[in-house]
Amino acid sequence: MSSSLTTPILVTGATGFIGSNLVRRLVLDYKEIHIIIRKESNLCRLNDIIDKMNVHIVDLIDRVAVEKVIEKIKPQTIFHLAAYGAYPFQNDVRKIKSVILDGTINLVDACLKHNFDILINTGSNSEYGFKNSPMKETDILCPNSQYAVMKAAATHYCNFIGRSQNRPIVTVRPFHIYGPYEEQTRFIPKLLTKLLDNGLPNLVSPDIARDMLYIDDAIDLFITIATNEPIDGDIYNMGSGQQSTIKSIVDVALLLTNSNVIPEWGSMGPRMWDQNIWIADMKKVKEIFDWEPRYSLKDGLIKTINWNKGTEYSPNRNYK
């Protein structure tokens, strides 16, 4: 592959946190960008750039409609990020299954009828479940939620089709991605919003761990994978390879916001997914793509704080 993405480019899940940041990067360099959205999708993250892409209103669970739109677009580069179930309030297991698994199958099968350069499916680090060491792409999966079960199934499908049919389909497994446009109920937005108002949210145990990756690094890795020769059916972690405890994240955020608020550890009860070891093994990505993140936790939080405060450019900050 060349250093440029081949067009047309298709993005599903473009109205979400990661998807919206991806299309914001893509519109800077490419003109043939298509997004698939549902009729009820909220375009608040894209309002200022929506005229720079082609919008197709199609529900991925509608197989016939998906086939028609893929036939029309004939995309060469496909970023598949559409999902449902990542948040506690998204708990309808049948909808989780239909959006993630059926939607992925419909998209992949429709794309198989045409030649394309790469299809990147977006999985989840929660597919791994609980591990006592850095999570490797070859680990046995033990999904820790209904969402993770369906993500794992979709990953297996993409892996099987890619390998068995020698088609350029791969999966990335994001860890804790954070930055501008993240859902406001998530840890980093809630933490920074409270700190900028001289407060703190309720906090779990200080020893709970995360592998934190700033959104710009995540987008860089998406594009790096898409512009390199894919290994059919392969899987790649998307993390920093560094573990951060909740305490270390809060400490850095307190320092950067010049706050003297005292954390109340344990003021939030433990969640079923909390654990003290949560880290991506990034050796495979480093070896294949020579890729490493550019932003440290401190640098990523600085950029996110500046975005929240309005000192870092964004025409659509108040998206919610």
Image: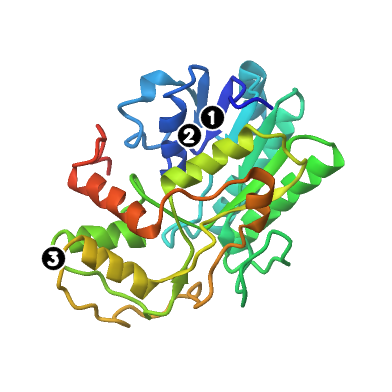
Residue 61 in sight in this render: no
Q: Is residue 185 above or below residue 266?
A: above
Q: Is residue 192 above or below residue 202?
A: above
- Image coordinates of residue 231 in percent, x first then y, are 76, 41
Question: What quarter of the picture does the C terminus occupy?
Answer: top left
Q: Which residue is mark 2?
A: 38
- Which marked residue is nearer to the observer: mark 3 or mark 2? 3
Element assignment for label 3: loop
Do the numbered discs 1 and 2 sit on residues whose CB atoms are within 8 Å?
yes
- Dot 2: within a 10 Å radius of its alpha carbon, few (fewer than 14), some, or many (20 or more) residues? some
Element assignment for label 2: loop
Question: What quarter of the picture does the N terminus occupy?
Answer: top right
Residue drawn at the location 74% of the way across and 35% of the way down: 168
Mark 1 or mark 2, earlier in chain: 2
Q: For marks 1 and 2, give the CA distance.
A: 5 Å
Q: Nearer the viewer, residue 224 or 290?
A: 290
- Label disc, if present, on residue 198 of the rendered structure: 3
Q: For marks 1 and 3, give the CA distance.
A: 43 Å
- Image coordinates of residue 297 in percent, x first then y, are 38, 59
With 32 as the anchor, is 235 left or right in this view? right
Do the numbered discs 3 and 2 sit on residues whose CB atoms are within 8 Å?
no
Where, by quadrant of the figure, is residue 237 drawn?
bottom right
Q: For marks 3 and 2, give the CA distance.
A: 38 Å
- Which marked residue is nearer to the observer: mark 1 or mark 3? 3
Residue drawn at the location 49% of the way across and 20% of the way down: 30
- Image coordinates of residue 9 in percent, x first then y, are 57, 25
The amino acid pointed to by label 2 is: Arg
With 52 as the anchor, is 9 left or right in this view? right
Could you tell me how many numbered marks the image carries? 3
Q: Which residue is mark 1?
A: 58
